Amino acid sequence: MSEHVSVMPERAIQLLDVKPDGIYVDGTLGRGGHSKLILEKLKNGKLYCFDLDEEAISKSREFLKAYDNVTFIHDNFMNMDRYVSHVDGILLDLGVSSPQFDDADRGFSYRYDAPLDMRMNKEEPFTAADIVNSYSEEDLRKVLWNYGEERNAGRIAAKIVESRPIETTGQLVEVIKSALPAKVLSKKGHPAKQTFQALRIEVNHELDSLNQFLERFDRILNIDGRLVIITFHSLEDRMVKHCFKRLSSVEDDKRIALRPEEVKKADYVLLNRGDKADEEEIESNHRAKSAIIRGIKKVYGKDR
Ligand SMILES: C[S@@+](CC[C@H](N)C(=O)[O-])C[C@H]1O[C@@H](n2cnc3c(N)ncnc32)[C@H](O)[C@@H]1O
């Protein structure tokens, strides 16, 4: 099984601007690559790491065992404010890790035949098979269209409903192929890619988690604190971009209402306008191809 190569590691750490005695949060621990870089910069500071996946936590616990200033939390990063407060930096590196994709049994990949699962958190009862076999044709179409931006969502949804029950990734790939016209099948890229992305997002409530997090992170971020997010598809990036734009442009009533003591004092500035990985990184790590990194910093209104 392959290990995970962290995306834009230097840029992420640079944007976070880790202070040696600061409190940091890695909301998407994965295999601990970014976490290790943060820990290397800390002296008296502390790092809290979240992941929905038990395996990510157990492997990273081992990988980071030399450090005693790190705490692992098996929960959704949207619940961060239940565990930590007054933090100096938060990093999110969204989506799925390479080991999750490459472990055939997890059912994330169209490259292996496995039960249709796709859960990051195995304690959740709801799998991709449940969606595929129980959603109405219209609800399936919406999932594929909204979360996969799949142009042939209607055809694929109809074929899925007609072909039930569908239990494995291999069966689903065949159903998708049989739903698509020859000219679509002859195009570059795997024909099941968009459908698999959509199902994964639906199973793990990925956009809801990000949305909730974006609504709540301000409660726990110190003045001078930074939030850095790496996204891998346009749906996520759009949400982050709009949120950062809103926070850094005008006073935002919703945010101010959350922290009445900071009315008109706190504000945000953009740290960049969305950077991509360079060619060299993309050559050696294909996951970096679609990645965009954005950062924002919380400041006093007068410092803008
Ligand atoms: C792209 S990987 C992170 C890789 C990590 N930065 C590294 O360098 O090894 C994303 C990780 O975030 C986890 N994850 C995704 N969404 C999550 C959420 N809402 N809450 C907690 N963990 C999440 C996944 O289980 C996966 O392990």
Image (cartoon, rainbow, N blue to C red):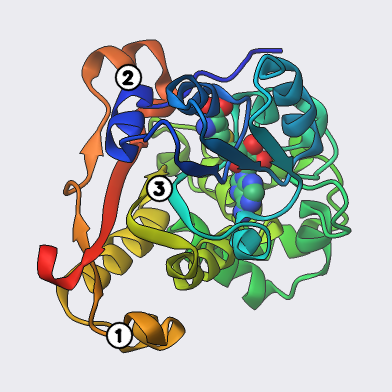
Location of residue 255 in the rendering, given as x and y in whole percent from the top left corner: 37, 80
Amino acid beneath label 3: His
Quadrant of the image for the N terminus? Answer: top right
- Which residue is located at x 23 percent, y 62 percent? 299
Element class at badge 1: loop
Q: Position of residue 145 (x, y in %)?
A: 49, 64
State which quadrant residue 79 falls in: bottom right
Between tags 2 and 1, which lies in front?
A: 1
For mark 3, give the secondary structure.
loop
Q: Is residue 79 left or right of residue 207?
A: right
Q: Label 3 CB, ligand 1: below 8 Å? A: no
Q: Nearer the viewer, mark 3 or mark 1?
A: 1
- The residue positioned 42% from the left and 81% from the top of the image is 259
- Mark 1 residue crowding within 10 angstroms, few (<14) / some (14–19) / many (20+): some
CB under 8 Å between callouts 2 and 3? no
Eyeballing the image, is 102 above or below 125? above
Q: Secondary structure at mark 2?
A: helix
First reached walking from the N terminus: tag 2 or tag 1: 1
List the residue tagged with mark 1: 263
Amino acid on which disc 1 is placed? Val
Looking at the rendering, in which quadrant would you find the C terminus? bottom left
Residue topped by disc 3: 233
Q: Is residue 114 left or right of residue 302?
A: right
Q: In terms of depth relative to the viewer, which is nearer, 141 or 84?
A: 84
Image quadrant of ligand 1 equals top right
Dot 3 alpha-carbon crowd within 10 angstroms: few under 14, some 14 to 19, many 20 or more: some
Query: Where is mark 2, residue-wise?
Result: 282
* Residue drawn 58% across the image and 41% down it: 28
